[in-house]
Each structure stands twice: as structure tokens, then as C-alpha cells.
Image (cartoon, coloured by chain):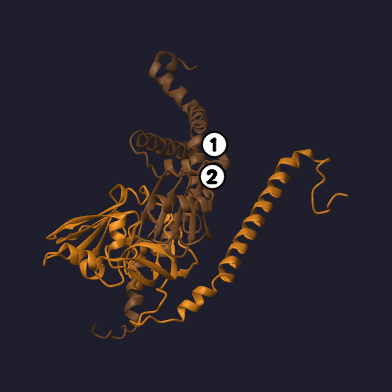
Chain colours: A orange, B brown
Amino acid sequence: MRDPRSPDLERFPELHSRWDRRTFIKGAAAGTALVAFGGALYRLAGDDLTRAARAETRTDGRPRLPPGQRVIRALRNMGGDEGPGDVRSFRLRVHGAVKTPFELDYAALLKLPQTEQASDVHCVTGWSRLGAQFKGVQVALLAEKAGVKGDVRHVIFEAAHGYTTNVPFAEATAPNVLATYRMDGKPFAIENGAPVRALVPDLYFWKSAKWLTGVRFVVRDEPGYWEVRGYHNHASPWTEERYG
Amino acid sequence: MTNAAASDPEGSLWIAVKRRWRGWLRAIHRDLGYLAVGLTLIYALSGLAINHIADWDPNFVSYTRERTIAPIPAEVPDPDAIAQARAALQVGAPRSTYRAGDEIHLEYDDKKLVVYGDSGKVIEQGRESRFFLRVANWLHYNRGKKAWTYVADTYALLLLYLAVSGIFMIKGKKGLRWRGALLLSLGAGVPLGYVVWSGGPSAANRAAVERAQARPPPAPTPDP
């Protein structure tokens, strides 16, 4: 039986195309609304971690979760030009304004004094991963081993395919800054920077260069890949230094 | 044809252009539209995929599996340790192997296995490319560079033509006199409205500075 609200299309066939379009637009609008509502509900329901983190404070007095961030459970793959990812070809060059530049392979890196720490990381796109356990070698130790010259002010993390990112020397040599190869007891997946990536937990995560190939100490600042593409030169998550 | 037009070939051409330009516009729009379909699918689908990169991996489906085998002590020589790991995991010959610290790495083309000799914990990591999207994303990001830059530039020009010619394709009430003008204003209003509403590119920084200034300074940290 015909719906009394719909036109008699047998009697008025010229209305067919208009009625079909109307039905389509209604269906599309309803579908879009449903997807948007479902997405919003999913976001709200899954945000207990974010609410809990917002209530916490770090030992330095800053909130544990920087403004504009939400907590997720696993690192996301944010793209980038991947390096080879294997341990066999890995080399880390420590160089620049240093007295004794050197190069490490993976085995040599593992022979250096190791640091294990829990750190929070914050991506500029708005997600944060809290309390992950990282293992690696302090950049401060690499600086000490290389004999950094007195006028060095910045550290350039170098990575596969010419990617670079800059960090002030004092922040790059903080005790929680590592060349890290293990997270939560597992090696990094290739998309997350295997085999070794930088870890600079107190700056947005793009400063933690994936597929690390070098640590270069410099006197003058050299903004890196994202920094010359509109992102902030310093990148503190607590003052939301997202864009330059 | 008028007498004036007949005696003036340039005039007749002008009249022909005036009469038929919309037809030519439509014909060129149609043909360039066909040409643009392939690249539009690539850029649009890849754009959707990349836009949500913070929520999913648009290129790969990755996995990590964990299992445990008997520990392999550091004293076991490398070849024996690798053979022992392979036997316990029942895996074929790897592409390459590596041993450093307590780690034994077995690398295959599509996965890697890392055995932590001390504990016997084994982590297997692998991934598979997403059909079509990985290639589309690669093109979208212009990772190949070189010739693709010219293709992308040409496509951008083509899109500009399609957009501008689309405005003038139909005359009358369904064209710029009413419906077309309304939809055109609506479409142009979306980015304009968003910039006004969001405050534009510098607004995020200004807001962050204001928030930072409004917060009390952090408690002083003790000297190391």
C-alpha cells in the first residue's frame, strides 16, 4: 500500500526523479547525522583516561596532561619517510661541535650505560600516551662521551632521509632525553621509528625524531623539517607551542 | 547571418564566439572532467585517509604478537642461539640475523622477530600494506618527487579550470542568476566563515599564550 505522504508516482511519473532525489538527500542526511552522533558518543565514552589524567599534577607543578590533549592507549603512526628499520644497518653519528665525534652501531649502543624510565609523550595533533616505559641511552651521556664544546647551544636530531629537528642544548641533555630502542618491553615498530628514535618527552613528539641516524651539537640554531614548515621552533606542550 | 557580419569575418567570429562559448566551455569541462576522474579518486580517497592519520594508520595494517620460549643465556654462541630461537619458534631461514645485548633479531621480508634471551620473551612485529591507499597516499604526499610534481601541478590547473568553467556552464535561474549564485556563495562562505570563527592561523598561538599567562606559575623545582 502506498504511503499517503508520498506522491502517486504511477499517476505522476514526471515526479519520479524529484522524489528519488529527495529520498536520497534525506537518507544521506540521516546517515551523516548517525555517523557524527556515533563518533561523538565513541569519543565521549572512551575519554575516562583523559579525565583521570587531567586531575593529575607532575612533580614540577605542571598538569600531567597539557592543554588540548587527549589520552590514547598506543602510539599512532603519524607517517614520515621511514628509515630501513633494521638493527644490522643502524648507525648513530654523534658529531658537530665536539672534541671527539664518534659513530655507534646497535650493539655498541646497547653496551653503553642504559636508562629505563616511564615517560609521557604528547603529539602536536592532540593525542598523548602516558606512562610508557622507555629504555635507551641518555643524550647527555652521548654529549659527555663526545666532549661537547663550551659554545654549543642546540642539538640537532638527524634521521632517515634528511629529517632533522632542533632542541635547545639544555633541554636535549635533560636526564629524561634518550636515544631509545625499546618501549613497554618491545622494540619499536618500523612505523614508530625502529630501531632507534629520539625521546624528548617534554616537547611535542615531532621533536623525538624517528629512525634516528645522528645527534649533532651546534652553536647556532637550525630549525628542522617541521620547524621551517610552520611548526613552532620550541614546541612546549604546556604552552601549546604548536605553530610558529 | 547579417550583412555586416558577412562583410566582416572578425565580426562573424565574434558573434560565433558569443553564441557558442558556453557550449565550448561545457564540452571542454566534460572532457577535462573525464581526464580528472582518476586523479580525483586518488587525491580524494587519500585525503580522507590522511586527514584522520591520528586515528588510524592509512598505509598499513600492523600487528604485534608476543609469546615466550625457553630463555637463551648470553653464553650460548651466536649461531647456536639463533638456531635455538628458530627451532623454538619453528620459523624458516630469516633474511638476516643480529645479536646484541640480550636481543636476538630474526628479520624476514614481511615481519621481524625479536627474542629477549634473558626472559625468553618473543615479540613478533609485522604489517601489510592497505590495498590502493598506500600507493594513493604515496602519490598524494608526492614522495616520488620528480615527474609527479608536474602531474600534480597540471592536475591543480585542471581543477581550477573545472571550478571556474563550472560557474558559467549554465545560464538562467539554475546558473548564476539564482541557484548557482546561492550555492557558490555558500561554498565560498564555508572557508571564509571558518577563518572568521576560528580566528585564523595565529589564533591558536594567541589563545595558548593567554591560557599560559592565566595559569599560576609552576612551583619551583628543588636544585639537583
Categorize mark 1 by other alpha carbons within 10 Å: few (<14), some (14-19), many (20+): some
Closest to the observer: A155 or A135?
Answer: A135
The residue depicted at 36 percent of the width and 80 percent of the height is: A62
Categorize mark 2 by other alpha carbons within 10 Å: few (<14), some (14-19), many (20+): many
Q: Earlier in the sequence, mark 1 or mark 2?
A: 1
Residue under pointer 2:
B180
Q: Position of residue B195 (x, y in %)?
A: 41, 60
For residue B60, above or below residue A196: above
Q: Position of residue A78 (x, y in %)?
A: 42, 56
The residue depicted at 30 percent of the width and 47 percent of the height is: A161
Q: Amino acid at mark 2?
A: Gly
Q: Position of residue A95 (x, y in %)?
A: 18, 56
Marks 1/2 in contact by CB < 8 Å: the verdict is yes
For residue B75, above or below residue A22: below
Of the numbered discs in the image, which one, if any, rests on residue B170? 1
Closest to the observer: B31 or B93?
Answer: B93
Separation of marks 1 and 2 at Cα, in angstroms: 9 Å
Left or right: B222 in relation to A119: left
